[in-house]
Image (tube, rainbow, N blue to C red):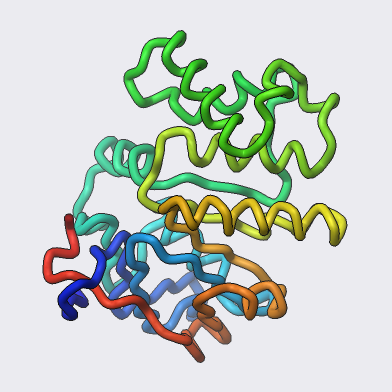
Amino acid sequence: MIADAAGGRPAVLELEDVWKSYPGGVHALRGVSLTIAEGELLGIVGPSGSGKSTLLHLMGMLDRPTSGRVLVRGHDVDRLADRRLSALRGRSLGFVFQQFHLSEGMTATDNVATGLLYSGFPPRRRRAMAREALDRVGLAQRAEHLPHQLSGGQKQRVAIARALVGRPSLVLADEPTGALDSRTGHDVMELLRALHTTGTTIAVITHDRELADSLPRRVEILDGRVRHDTGAWPLTKDSTA
């Protein structure tokens, strides 16, 4: 584990010399090492075929590495049984996708509450927490609207609220502005920046270099390798805190 400077922050996610290979000798990732500290806002940028989608799947515990280690809050993902892996994913990570992935027959509140299905909270508490999350993203007045009654930007705000509702250690935003016009995309990024200032750790995965350049930290992926990293935050010695 990478850990050092006093006054630093604990690591939320660590990749140590991670490779991901497929039959036929295809190497999607080649020795990637990356650490994300609590409280960071960073962009992971690369063109199509660079390996960033594979990296997202490993960071999100949706796949396992061929070799190397992925640690989430100090837990080695490859050592966990599927049930414990699912529990850690649900507790530690929130996901925002380009296409929103909202259920058309459910209100904004109920869509957000699905982020808590495996939390153990009773339905009434899940709905209350969902309404709180919608308020955080400025959609309290749209809580009972269905997806077809919302604009693209509002749908993405619902998706962000769903990612935030369980207060995860890390939010992974995969091309969060990709399905939006430029003005709406700008508004969504301003929302993510505002959420970051309140302590949310966010990694934005994108092909948009301009967007990545606007974030405090930029990690460039090319040909399955980290080609450039503008710099991680200092970490505390106990990265599992």
Q: Is residue 205 left or right of residue 99?
A: left
Residue 197 x/y as whole percent: 48, 57
Decide if residue 182 is in sight here.
yes
- Residue appearing at x 44%, y 23% in the figure: 117
| Figure quadrant of residue 123 | top left
Which quadrant of the rendered structure holds the C terminus? Answer: bottom left
Closest to the observer: 207 or 43? Answer: 43
Of 73 and 61, nearer the camera is 73
Vertically, is 69 above or below 26? above
Residue lying furthest left in this view?
A: 237
Q: Quadrant of the N terminus?
A: bottom left
Residue 84 in the image: state x and y as whole percent.
Answer: 25, 39
- Is residue 99 depicted above or below 202 in this figure? above
Above or below for 49 versus 239: below
Whole-percent x, y for residue 189 in the image = 67, 58
Does 114 sit above or below residue 218?
A: above
Could you say where residue 27 lies in the image, as x and y percent from the top left? Answer: 48, 79
* Residue 26 in sight from this viewpoint: no
Q: Left or right: 4 with respect to 218?
A: left
In the rendered view, does 144 fall on the left or right side of 9? right
Instruction: Give the residue drawn at x 49%, y 56%.
Output: 196
- The residue at the point 60 percent across, 76 percent down is 45
Residue for point 38% across, 38% down? 90
